[in-house]
Amino acid sequence: MVLESISRIIKMQLPAYLKKLPIPEKIGDFARLTVSEWLRLLPLLGILALLGYLTIRPFLPKKNKQRDSLINLKIQKENPRVMNEIDIEDLRTPSVCYCRCWRSKTFPVCDKSHLKHNELTGDNVGPLVLKKKTI
Ligand code: FES
């Protein structure tokens, strides 16, 4: 049933539609077409433009990945300025990583969210690593 309809459209209705189109024989004749003739040509021209676009689309340059204009997207947005103060004497482990990408869920401590951010954006941010000297 469906194939029969498609077959009828392609074999009978499409050729009849194309036959009725006012396609000029010379380029210059396009200028002489009336508005109603242009309107009759519009669906065909639209389909040809779409097919042309789909054909060349794989060869068009890819857009750059979306880059954030804001650095801090969600951390303490209620504050006009986010500042963290850490006393070096309070460091209990030999090394601590502090976030510089502003994507950490444990901010200001790095939770390695920068890895996903770098992968998505092509960025190269990483943590600030504070190390205690062992004497
Ligand atoms: Fe931000 Fe690691 S999570 S630098």
Image (tube, rainbow, N blue to C red):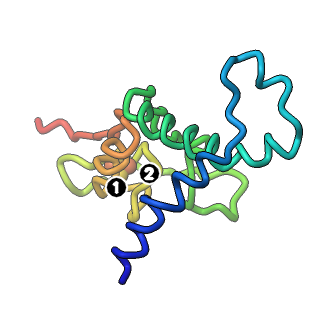
Q: Amino acid at mark 2?
A: Ile
Question: Against 94, is 12 above or below?
Answer: below
Q: Is mark 1 within 8 Å of ligand 1?
A: no
Is 115 on the left or on the right of 80, as rendered? Answer: left
- Give residue 90's mark: 1
Secondary element at image label 2: loop
- Give residue 69's mark: none
At x 43% / y 54%, what residue is drawn? 103
At x 29% / y 40%, what residue is drawn? 130
Secondary element at image label 1: helix
User: Residue 125, located in which quarter of the rendered image?
Assistant: top left
Q: Furthest-bottom residue in view?
A: 1
Does residue 130 show up?
Answer: yes
Question: Against 26, is 97 above or below?
Answer: below
At x 57% / y 54%, what residue is drawn? 16
At x 43% / y 45%, what residue is drawn? 101
Q: Return the x and y of residue 124 as percentages of the image width and height.
A: 34, 33
Distance CA(mark 1)–CA(mark 2):
7 Å
- Are dots 1 and 2 in contact, CB under 8 Å? yes
Does residue 98 show up?
Answer: no
Q: Amino acid at mark 1?
A: Asp
Say which of marks 1 and 2 sits in front: 2
Q: Return the x and y of residue 45 as percentages of the image width and height.
A: 64, 40
**Which quarter of the rendering shows the C terminus?**
top left
User: Residue 44 or 50: which is nearer the viewer?
Assistant: 44
**Which quarter of the rendering shows the N terminus?**
bottom left
- Give residue 86's mark: 2
Is 1 on the left or on the right of 80, as rendered? Answer: left
User: Residue 35 or 95: which is nearer the viewer?
Assistant: 35
